Image (spheres, grey):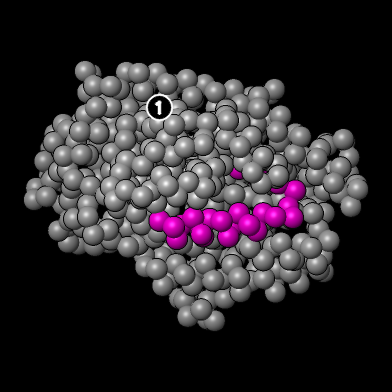
């Protein structure tokens, strides 16, 4: 079966945010490389983010297409081109972009009616996909951009309200394969949102995740027993693409020759393992007060840093930085501050990077693991509080800084900030030669080995991808 059978016509539908889109586009390319006919359904601006890569795959003989659906900009009152959460900086705009996922249902459904695929693989955010698939009789699998570990933790929290009676943490979570603690009370709102999304997995043939079996050890079984649904681990998708196709994953471009990004050129001047990469992902907009604390904290740690800040592009006034901060760090060649998009996966792969002060977005976490970079964790919102636990308490590949309070949104400035002292302490304990970094670094290297093994021929993710294609073939034959 699989590659010898008639190719399947598979539609994939990524949600409009980088953390969702990058891994699902990588998955589309992986499935196309297994001789299947893949179409990615998306909107014009989102298509621009990966069109070039897809054209290269096509030129290499893979059947992969982009089908464009118009974004309902006028209906939502959004300026033309604002079609991705990356372009949002407030809840209202983000809410409208999320709403587009619902408004597009009739257009996508009518396209599918006229050109029915054999299989439909939407992002979990398209909750209407359950009824569409049912109505059209099309088998469906769901892509979930967060980790299976998170879903298990959310479930354990829900089942043990007695663990949260105290007004202050740490809160001990029972019932999971590892003893886990949460420093602050989780938001019931987030659990509700996640549950409603996971609910939409019902009736599907399982959930596909950007992770590898070894990273979710113990939790996959927990999840499968809990939901009765199968988990397909086909990640890290960027490593899989790199390995399978000898090509650049969507997020590993812009690092070669004349195109070399300034961050990479700067890293070339630094010593191996000496730089802390600081990034809070594509969505988080930290308050000026929090940015100030990060600046003071990293400066006090005396370690070199590459700091990427989003949401400040084009702003003249740097009143969120301590006086003279940029000049001091530039003069000593100790730091580089970039306002705007950077090639993160390439940065994490650079030998000069010794640690990653991260918001624990799921993709950032998987990318750090793939590069063997230990983390300093400071979650921003949503699932990131749980990813932190996987890093610091399950696999012990990071130092925990933690958060000051829970947030559901990347745009709401928190009332309390994480202090400069906490940040300095976290950075030092990973990066100082007499800190706890040695053991953590060793485990991060071991986890990287596991990730790389998973994507090799005969590795767990590679086998899972083959099994997935075979499974889809058999489902379609029986349909
Ligand atoms: N990313 C990047 N450059 C940036 C910011 C983000 O390449 O300047 C990529 C990052 O490597 C990851 C994705 O965007 O693949 C962000 O996903 P993640 O789940 O880490 O966080 P989110 O942005 O969704 O909070």
- Label 1 residue near ligand 1, CB within 8 Å: no
For residue 51, what is the image quadrant?
Answer: bottom right
- x and y percent of residue 437 in the render? 30, 22
Residue 116 versus residue 298 in the image, above or below: below
Q: Is residue 340 visible?
A: no
Q: What residue lies at 54% left-to-right and 71% top-to-bottom? A: 99
Q: Please tell me which residue lies in front, 252 or 402.
A: 402
Residue 151 versus residue 372 in the image, above or below: below
- x and y percent of residue 222 in the render? 61, 37
For residue 124, what is the image quadrant?
Answer: bottom right
Q: What residue lies at 28% left-to-right and 21% top-to-bottom? A: 436
- x and y percent of residue 426 in the render? 25, 33
Q: What residue lies at 86% left-to-right and 42% top-to-bottom? A: 474
Toward the right, the furthest residue is 478
Q: Where does the N terminus fall, quadrant-wise?
A: top right
> How would you rate the neighbour count of disc 1 (Cα within 10 Å): few for under 14, some for 14-19, many for 20 or more?
some
User: Mark 1 — residue?
Assistant: 396
- x and y percent of residue 379 in the render? 35, 46
The residue segment tinted magenta is 187-209
Toward the left, the furthest residue is 323
Residue 208 located within the stretch drawn in magenta: yes
Q: Please tell me which residue lies in front, 78 or 297.
A: 297
User: Left of 184 or right of it: where is 161?
Assistant: right
Residue 382 located within the stretch drawn in magenta: no
Q: Is residue 128 visible?
A: yes
Under circle 1, the secondary element is loop
Residue 302 versus residue 404 in the image, above or below: above
């Amino acid at each position: 079966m699989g590659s010898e059978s008639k190719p399947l016509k598979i539609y994939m539908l990524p949600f409009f945010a980088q953390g969702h889109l990058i891994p699902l586009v990588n998955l589309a390319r992986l499935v196309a490389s297994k001789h299947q006919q893949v179409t990615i359904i998306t909107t014009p601006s989102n298509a621009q983010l990966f069109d070039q890569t897809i054209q290269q795959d096509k030129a290499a003989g893979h059947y992969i297409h982009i089908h464009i659906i118009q974004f309902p900009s006028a209906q939502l009152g959004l300026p033309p081109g604002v079609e991705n959460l990356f372009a949002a900086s407030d809840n209202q705009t983000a809410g409208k972009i999320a709403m587009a996922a619902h408004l597009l249902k009739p257009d996508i459904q009518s396209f599918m009616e006229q050109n029915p695929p054999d299989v439909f693989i939407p992002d979990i955010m398209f909750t209407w996909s359950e009824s569409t698939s049912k109505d059209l009789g099309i088998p469906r699998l769901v892509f979930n951009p967060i980790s299976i570990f998170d879903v298990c933790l959310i479930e354990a929290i829900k089942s043990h309200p007695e663990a949260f009676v105290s007004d202050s943490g740490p809160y001990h979570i029972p019932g999971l394969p590892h003893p886990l603690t949460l420093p602050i009370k989780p938001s019931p709102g987030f659990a509700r949102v996640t549950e409603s999304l996971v609910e939409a997995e019902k009736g599907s043939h399982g959930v596909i995740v950007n992770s590898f079996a070894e990273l979710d050890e113990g939790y996959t079984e927990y999840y499968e027993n809990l939901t009765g649904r199968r988990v397909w681990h086909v990640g890290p998708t960027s490593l899989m693409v790199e390995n399978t196709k000898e090509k650049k994953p969507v997020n590993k471009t812009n690092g070669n020759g004349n195109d070399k990004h300034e961050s990479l050129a700067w890293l070339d001047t630094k010593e191996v393992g000496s730089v802390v990469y600081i990034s809070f992902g594509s969505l988080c907009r930290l308050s000026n007060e929090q940015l100030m604390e990060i600046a003071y904290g990293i400066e006090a740690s005396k370690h070199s840093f590459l700091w990427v800040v989003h949401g400040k592009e084009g702003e003249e006034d740097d009143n969120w930085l301590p006086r003279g901060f940029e000049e001091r760090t530039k003069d000593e060649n100790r730091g580089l501050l970039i306002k705007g998009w950077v090639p993160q996966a390439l940065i994490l792969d650079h030998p000069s990077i010794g640690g990653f002060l991260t918001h624990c977005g799921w993709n950032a976490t998987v990318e750090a693991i793939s590069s063997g970079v230990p983390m300093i964790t400071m979650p921003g919102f949503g699932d990131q509080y749980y990813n932190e636990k996987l890093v610091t308490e399950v696999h012990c590949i990071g130092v925990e800084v933690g958060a000051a309070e829970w947030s559901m949104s990347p745009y709401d400035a928190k009332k309390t900030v994480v202090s400069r002292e906490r940040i300095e302490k976290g950075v030092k304990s990973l990066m100082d030669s007499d800190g706890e970094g040695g053991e953590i670094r060793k485990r991060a290297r071991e986890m990287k080995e596991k990730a790389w093994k998973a994507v090799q021929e005969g590795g767990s993710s590679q086998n899972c991808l083959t099994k997935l294609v075979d499974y889809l073939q058999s489902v379609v034959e029986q349909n």
